[in-house]
Image (tube, rainbow, N blue to C red):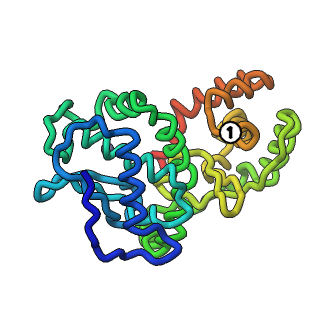
Amino acid sequence: MYELCRDADPVTESQRSLLWLRERADCLWKAHFSDVPIGYPLQVSWGIRAHHRFGSISARDEKAVVRLNMLFAFPEVPEYVIDAVLVHEFVHYAHGFGSGLPKRYRHPHRGGVIEKELALRGLLAQDVRADEWLKTCWEEVYRQYRPDLVAKQENTQTRFTPVLPTNGRTLQEIETRLNVLAFRLGSEPYALGWLSATRRHRGMSYFFLKEKTVQLHPLLADKKVPDCVIDLELAYWLTRFQIGANWQKIALRLSEAGFQKTLDDALAYKRNRWTRLLKTQ
Ligand SMILES: [Zn+2]
């Protein structure tokens, strides 16, 4: 199934090599996909350094070529994230996309076909975990290795001019709320900052691993955004640092600690008003 061809390996020592990637892929295939019929021979390589594309599979010269974002060669990206992207592409292969096998579905992603297949193969939990990492930590790794591109993007008016309203919430006020909430939840307060937001930032707050800081979207300074929303953002991270990233568990813990109304009101606001507020910027 595997061809280990000797492409020139473009990565340096601290980074994961092409050989490493191919051995990893081989291992995953043998462990989880050995029942899949054989179509085109699979060839795994590093691809371009991309921001939003993590992996791809396509048929080329009767080969199924899987490419992974080359930034995943850096040690900051956990192995389970690489595994999750590889098995995602393997599912496409099994479904007949890029593999020369008969297509099992009309569309590669629609109808949750990937998740269903991953669940059948016992790989869904890893996928969820990788997704969570990509949502919370990827942006920072990307910024570290592509500062040139990030600067370029931000210059083309994607960055919000940091218009903190003059009579809006101050960081000190929010820190005071954080301390109160930390006390109620029996958790430790964390460092807070304002996010230098771009249009890609659709979330209200982000955790930056390197600085160990939770950064708030500057629109949260606007008092038109209700207090319950700020409370939920702050309480979310307080709880998450205590018990992990599982949203169901976080919601349960918050509810038990008397935050059910905050939770309901804030989530209603998030669903209905937040997206509109982002659009007006
Ligand atoms: Zn896909």
**Badge 1 density bin: few <14, some 14–19, many ≥20, Cα 10 Å:** few
Instruction: Count numbered badges in the picture.
Output: 1
Q: Quadrant of ligand 1?
A: top left
Viewer-proximal residue, 251 or 4? Answer: 4
Q: Quadrant of residue 33?
A: top left
The answer to whether residue 107 is left or right of residue 31 is left
Q: Secondary structure at mark 1?
A: loop
Across and down, in percent, residue 270 comes to: 56, 34
Across and down, in percent, residue 78 comes to: 54, 55
Report the residue marked by disc 1. 244
The answer to whether residue 185 is left or right of residue 122 is right
Would you say the beta carbon of the disc 1 residue lies within 8 angstroms of ligand 1? no
Viewer-proximal residue, 243 or 121? Answer: 121
Residue at 50% across, 62% down? 159
Viewer-proximal residue, 166 or 257? Answer: 257
Q: Give the residue type that dot 1 points to.
A: Gly
Viewer-proximal residue, 68 or 278? Answer: 68
The answer to whether residue 57 is left or right of residue 197 is left
Say above or below: 261 vs 13: above
Say above or below: 219 vs 225: below
Across and down, in percent, residue 50 comes to: 38, 62
Q: Quadrant of residue 19?
A: bottom left
Residue at 40% across, 32% down? 121
Residue at 42% across, 75% down? 11
Say above or below: 275 vs 218: above
Say above or below: 65 vs 12: above
Across and down, in percent, residue 152 comes to: 42, 72
Q: Residue furthest left?
A: 61
The answer to whether residue 58 is left or right of residue 125 is left
Residue at 44% across, 65% down? 71
